[in-house]
Image (cartoon, rainbow, N blue to C red):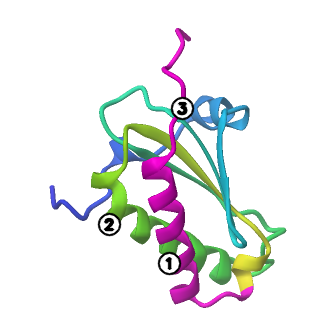
């Protein structure tokens, strides 16, 4: 598979994966996004998205935000530590152009690379 692709193994899919990140110790925030992260069960970083109708009533707008997040994650995934990351969109994301979203995400991925979590505990 292409290095810039996002395979199914790089996505959080089950409700249990999302629930595990609700109480995650690792948190980062920006104007448009909040990130929650914890150690991944697998070898690479995995992405989960939460873009609710509170962010925008228009599905077109919510899908644009999700596409921007996935594209940014594809480009930065190789440099990230093995973490499960949940990206939660905030209302400010709806009015922000895609270039602004990508710029904020670039900064958050950079901060995520340098952040540290205590070693994983047995689950």
Quarter holding residue 52: bottom right
Residue farthest to the right, as pictured: 54
Residue 92 placed where, x, y %?
77, 78
Tell me, yes or no, whether the highlighted magenta stretch contains residue 104. Answer: yes
Q: CA distance from mark 3 to mark 2?
A: 23 Å
The answer to whether mark 1 and mark 3 are in CB contact below 8 A is no
Above or below for 19 versus 10: above
Q: Secondary structure at mark 2?
A: helix
Which of pointers 3 and 2 indicates the residue nearer the eye?
A: 3
Q: Secondary structure at mark 1?
A: helix
Query: Few, some or many C-alpha atoms within 10 Å of disc 2 (few <14, some 14-19, many ≥20)?
Result: some
Point out the image quarter for the N terminus.
bottom left
Left or right position of 10 against 122:
left
**Residue occupying image coordinates x 80% and y 77%:** 57
Give whichever of 96, 15 is nearer the camera.
Answer: 96
Residue at which label 3 appears: 117
State the count of labels: 3
- Tell me which numbered mark, 1 or 3, is placed earlier along the sequence: 1
- Tell me which numbered mark, 3 or 2, is placed earlier along the sequence: 2
The dot on residue 102 is 1
Quarter holding residue 88: bottom right
Query: Few, some or many C-alpha atoms within 10 Å of disc 1 (few <14, some 14-19, many ≥20)?
Result: some
**Residue occupying image coordinates x 51% and y 68%:** 107
Q: Secondary structure at mark 3?
A: loop
Residue 78 placed where, x, y %?
27, 53
Give whichever of 8, 36 is nearer the camera.
Answer: 36
The answer to whether mark 2 and mark 1 are in CB contact below 8 A is no
Residue at which label 2 appears: 75
Residue farthest to the left, as pictured: 1
**Residue occupying image coordinates x 72% and y 72%:** 31
Q: Which residues are magenta?
A: 95-123
């Amino acid at each position: 598979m292409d290095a810039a692709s996002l395979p199914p193994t790089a996505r959080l899919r089950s409700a249990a994966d999302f629930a595990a990140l609700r109480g995650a110790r690792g948190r980062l925030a920006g104007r448009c996004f909040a990130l929650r992260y914890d150690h991944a069960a697998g070898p690479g970083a995995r992405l989960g998205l939460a873009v609710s109708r509170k962010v925008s009533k228009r599905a077109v707008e919510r899908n644009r935000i999700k596409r921007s997040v996935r594209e940014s994650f594809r480009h930065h995934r190789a440099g990230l530590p093995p973490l499960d990351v949940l990206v939660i969109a905030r209302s400010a994301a709806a009015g922000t152009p895609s270039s602004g979203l990508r710029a904020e995400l670039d900064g958050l991925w950079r901060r995520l690379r340098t952040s540290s979590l205590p070693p994983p505990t047995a689950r």
